[in-house]
Image (cartoon, helix red, strand yellow):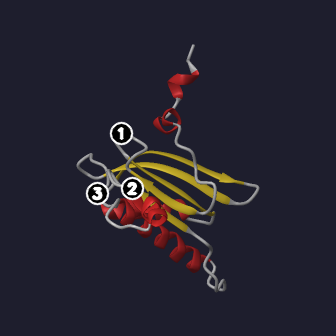
C-alpha cells in the first residue's frame, strides 16, 4: 500500500505557495538546492511552452514543476524548481524574473495584439544573501539582493 507522503513532490514538501496575484517571483531562499520560480498570469495557448523555451535557451535544468490553471479566472499559476547546468542555483534571480515577465508580456501581446494596455505585473527576486528587492524598496536603500 502506497503512503500519500511517498508521492509528495519537493514543492509540496517545502510548503512553497503559489502567487496570489499576477507576477513573477524568483527566489534562492525557498529551496536548498534549486531556485524557485513562481509565475501567475492570464492563461493562453503556449504560455507554458514559452516559459520552458526560455529556461532551455538559458541552459537551465527544470528539476520539478507544479502547473495549474484555474477555470474560474483562467489564471495559470506555475511553480518551477530550476538549476543552472552545473547544478547550482541561478546567479541572477532578478534578471530571470524580469526576463520571464518579458516573455509572458511579449507573448501575451502577440496572442492579443488589439489589447493596448499591459496588465499589472509584479516582479520580485530574492538573492542568496542581502535583503532582496522587497527589502530594498521598503528600506529605500541599495546594496542588497540580486
> Marks 3 and 2: CB-CB under 8 Å?
no
Disc 1 residue crowd, few under 14, some 14–19, many 20+, Cα 10 Å: few
Asked if one can make out residue 53 in the rendered structure from this viewpoint, the answer is no
Foreground: 43 or 122? 122
Q: Secondary structure at mark 3?
A: loop
Instruction: State how far apart marks 3 and 2 are (Cα).
Output: 16 Å
Q: Nearer the viewer, mark 1 or mark 2?
A: 2
> Marks 1 and 2: CB-CB under 8 Å?
no
Q: What residue is shown at x 46% (from left), y 50% (from top)?
A: 80
Q: What residue is shown at x 33% (from left), y 41% (from top)?
A: 33
Residue at which label 3 appears: 91
Q: Secondary structure at mark 1?
A: loop
Of labels 3 and 2, earlier in sequence is 3
Of labels 1 and 3, earlier in sequence is 1
Residue at which label 1 appears: 32
Which mark identifies residue 131?
2
Name above or below for residue 141 compared with residue 78.
Answer: below
Q: Quadrant of the N terminus?
A: top right
Q: Nearer the viewer, mark 3 or mark 2?
A: 2
Asked if one can make out residue 37 in the rendered structure from this viewpoint, the answer is yes
Disc 3 residue crowd, few under 14, some 14–19, many 20+, Cα 10 Å: some
Residue 114: percent from left, percent from top:
66, 86
Residue 124: percent from left, percent from top:
47, 61
**Position of residue 83 in the picture relative to residue 114 (left or right):** left
Disc 2 residue crowd, few under 14, some 14–19, many 20+, Cα 10 Å: many
Foreground: 4 or 94? 94
**Position of residue 134 in the picture relative to residue 111 (left or right):** left
Instruction: State how far apart marks 1 and 2 are (Cα).
Output: 18 Å
Amino acid at each position: 500500500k502506497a503512503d500519500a507522503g511517498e508521492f509528495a513532490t519537493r514543492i509540496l514538501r517545502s510548503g512553497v505557495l503559489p502567487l496570489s496575484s499576477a507576477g513573477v517571483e524568483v527566489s534562492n531562499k525557498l529551496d536548498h538546492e534549486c531556485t524557485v520560480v513562481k509565475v501567475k498570469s492570464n492563461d493562453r495557448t503556449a504560455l507554458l511552452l514559452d516559459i520552458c523555451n526560455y529556461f532551455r535557451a538559458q541552459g537551465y535544468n527544470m528539476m520539478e514543476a507544479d502547473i495549474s490553471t484555474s477555470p474560474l479566472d483562467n489564471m495559470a499559476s506555475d511553480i518551477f524548481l530550476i538549476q543552472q547546468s552545473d547544478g547550482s542555483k541561478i546567479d541572477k534571480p532578478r534578471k530571470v524574473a524580469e526576463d520571464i515577465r518579458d516573455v509572458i508580456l511579449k507573448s501575451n501581446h502577440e496572442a492579443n495584439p488589439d489589447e493596448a494596455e499591459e496588465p499589472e505585473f509584479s516582479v520580485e527576486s530574492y538573492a542568496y544573501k542581502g535583503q532582496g528587492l522587497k527589502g530594498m524598496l521598503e528600506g529605500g536603500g541599495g546594496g542588497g539582493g540580486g
